[in-house]
Amino acid sequence: MRLKILGSAAGGGFPQWNCNYRLSRAARAGDGGVQPRLQSSLAASAGDDRGWVLFNASPDIRQQISDTPELQPAADAPLRSTPIRAVVLTNADVDHLAGLLSLRERQAFHLYATARVLDVLAENPIFRVLDPAYVRRLPVTLDRPFAVEGPDGATGLTAELFAVPGKVALFLETGAAAADFEADPEDTVGVRITDAGGRSAFYVPGCARVDPALLHRIEDGDALLFDGTVFTDREMAEAGVGEKTGRRMGHLPIADEDGSLQALASAGIARRVFVHINNTNPILDQRSPERRVVEEAGWEVAFDGMEIAL
Ligand code: MLT
Ligand code: MN
């Protein structure tokens, strides 16, 4: 299987349009140690002739397709065509579903998500731009592997969605923790992607906590692409850009006590990659001590266009 990171930044991208923090400024200035990044999305393929499955559709999807020849119509393909055969969503946050609006134009693909996430689409009439005659919305049951198909059959990939600690989409928050956090296991999921040879990758771009169930589940994976939103829980406040902690946003910090470095240290997984990186996270600077910390702990930091062959 081939995995391609289409966007390694969290919601807002990097630099974010209105962000004047030092990291966004450095990226805008063309500082080579601080690469710009598009918003969170992953593509996977079982082989070049099998097409591609997108995991999340970011608001930057048009740019991501422009940057990725594999996702463009082949020279000998029909006048309207795409190698993108299916899209799988892991939650209903804007950074993961707004790109669906750019996939209109009466092009067939399958759309998979939990019933809860599909309900969010159903309640927002703008998503009717995806004509149901072309785009089938397929509800996925948690913990049940399914063959990911496109309109013309199998993609050669199997996916399994599983609940991870998290919350509803930001724009659906009520402010009441009991309603916003873990009220419904279908709000935030991780996905296990497996090919016919049994190689598998876990993609978990949002996760509020590593619990024993998650640790156990990822044991036999070949790669883990995990929530790297913030380095420390209070990073946004310390940067002066906002009051919210990482945990309040549903994102486990990397470095604090019980952060992902510590919580996942014992996971027997060969390749570990941080994805969904916020514009305040110091690991965005390749020269930073924080970047060294994650690399010395055996983690990679995703960048746009990063390929992982399993
Ligand atoms: C998140 O991951 O916390 C969300 O993408 C936030 C947002 O919607 O901007
Ligand atoms: Mn996000």
Image (cartoon, rainbow, N blue to C red):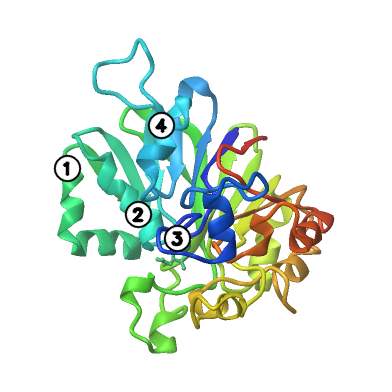
Q: Position of residue 281 (x, y in %)?
A: 62, 64
Label 1: which secondary element: loop
Measure how far apart labels 1 and 4 are at the Cα level.
Answer: 23 Å
Closer to the chain start, of discs 1 and 4, is 4
Give the residue number, with chain letter if any, for mark 2: 97
Q: Which residue is mark 3?
A: 11
- Residue for badge 1: 131
The type of residue carrying mark 2 is Leu
Q: First in sequence: mark 1 or mark 2? A: 2
Label 1 is placed on what type of residue? Asp
Asked whether mark 3 and ligand 1 are closer than 8 Å, the reply comes as yes
Q: Amino acid at mark 4?
A: Ser
Callout 2 secondary element:
helix
Q: Is residue 39 visible?
A: yes
At which x and y percent is residue 143?
51, 58
**Apparent side of residue 170 relative to residue 289 in the rendered image (left or right):** left
Image quarter (top left, top right, bottom left or bottom right) of the N terminus: top right
Q: Residue at x 44, y 41 (%)?
A: 54
Q: Earlier in the sequence, mark 3 or mark 1?
A: 3
